[in-house]
Image (tube, rainbow, N blue to C red):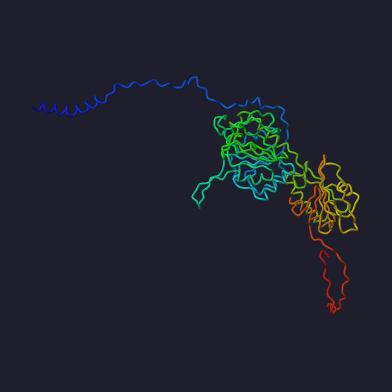
Amino acid sequence: MKRNLTLLAVAALILPALIRGLWFYTGFASRPRIATPDYKSLTMPTAPVETPMAVADENVKALGGTVVADYAHTNQFQMGEVQSLKEEIERRGGKLEFNADATLLNNSLKYASAYVIISPSVAFSSSEIHSIQEFVGRGGRLLVFTDATRGVMYYDFNTGNTLLAPDVNAVNPLLANFGISVNNDYLYNLAENEGNFRNVYFNQFGKDELTFGLKQVALYGTHSIRSDSGLILFPEADSTLSSVDDAHNAADGAAALSPDGNVAVFGDFTFLTTPYNNVADNATLIANLADFLLSGKRTTSMANFPYLFRQSTVQVFPTSEVQMTAELISSLAKLQSSLGAVNVSVKIASEKPTDGDSIVLGTFTPSDDLKPYLKPFDLVLDDFNEFVDAPGFGKVGKSGNGIVLFEPGSKGNTVVLLADSIDDLTLLLDTLSSGSLDSCVFQGNMGVCSVGFGGSFSIETPTEVPATGEPTQGEPVPTPTAGG
């Protein structure tokens, strides 16, 4: 009895499950064979790599010069990322240095062959823009890199949003002076790319030395660039689109050159870094950039002082009307210190230098040893006139003014300093030694500098004064005029 009850209980548990299984049973599953890729025969697409032989050149021209790279505007790059460009510059006898102090910009541009700006996050001040514009105007080269993958994130406390400040905001106010603008976008190509839609190939190029020898260049996250007056170096292919409107813009490209050929702008600088510098013809492009930076034709002017002289010694020649007073000796010592800071020594010459760099000291009093230095400037001195007829300036008052003449030459550069008196000449020499010519107005290679006070002079008959020392009643005491 007990056994029957146990079997009944087991059957009650098993039978419902068995009935459900038989009811819903559809037979044993048959799993079909799934086709898998043939991994052994699979080949991954690789970027076209430029072999070292394609860029090796035993006859690289030694150009020399110094390239200054901006590092004072929260630039979004590491120094090691431009190693390939640095090596190409050094192959040509030049050097690359970084300026991390914005206050030293003016001094750096005095001796630089070129100035490089890479993805800045802080805008340039109006005075910095003016200095760079003048530098380019003297023939200096400017190379600007932006990058769509770089920028600064910041938190907006008013809206609570996290915002991105792209590098185009910092460079466009500067580039506006050169007819170039960088768009806040990135270019992409879904049809042909280097492994990613934002890695864009460029196969057509504007004709210039910067694009010489290029057949294909790959850029990685590049902004588009527009220049209505300049040259688009890397035009976009028809299948290359902008992230702003997903359209092809025929007027834009990835690099541009200013009308005067002294300013080049690129929307990407990742191609400078390893391993991207060896993709396609990127290495050839980097070599061309080094040539561009060092081959500018800079005009030497007084703005370059103290980096004005070519030789290690400057001869200072006091003409016959100049007396070596204690004050003038003190000023010469300041000049010696200023030039010594750039490894140039000073030597006093007793006779007119026939070659080499020289500084000539003279007064507005005519002298035979001064005439040869004045002739190229059509400057004629008259000892009986209160003014000097200076071409480009008109009549310049002698009192309180100094004149600076600069004559570059194949055998050396010559600077002539002229003033009405030894005291004014001393002040003019101090102005030169300071390296700041802000008190001077230049027209070409002639400048007029304010070094004191000037005005009209008059001679008045003094009023007779009694023996008591008091002036006669009703007669005013004469007041000296300015400068008298």
Q: Nearer the viewer, residue 1 or 288?
A: 1
- Left or right: residue 65 versus residue 242 is right
Q: Place residue 178 in its image quadrant.
A: top right
Q: Nearer the viewer, residue 229 or 357?
A: 229
Q: Relative to 329, say whether 47 is above or below.
A: above
Image coordinates of residue 200 in percent, x first then y, are: 59, 32
Tally of numbered tags:
0
Q: Nearer the viewer, residue 214 or 50?
A: 214
Q: Relative to 418, say whether 273 is above or below.
A: above
Image coordinates of residue 315 in percent, x first then y, are: 82, 45
Image coordinates of residue 199 in percent, x first then y, are: 57, 33
- Left or right: residue 69 versus residue 471 is left
Residue at left offset 75%, top offset 41%: 298
Q: Quadrant of the N terminus?
A: top left
Residue at left offset 51%, top offset 50%: 156
- Left or right: residue 419 versus residue 54 is right
Image coordinates of residue 130 in percent, x first then y, are: 69, 48
Q: Quadrant of the C terminus?
A: bottom right
Residue at left offset 91%, top offset 58%: 384
Q: Relative to 478, say whether 14 is above or below.
A: above
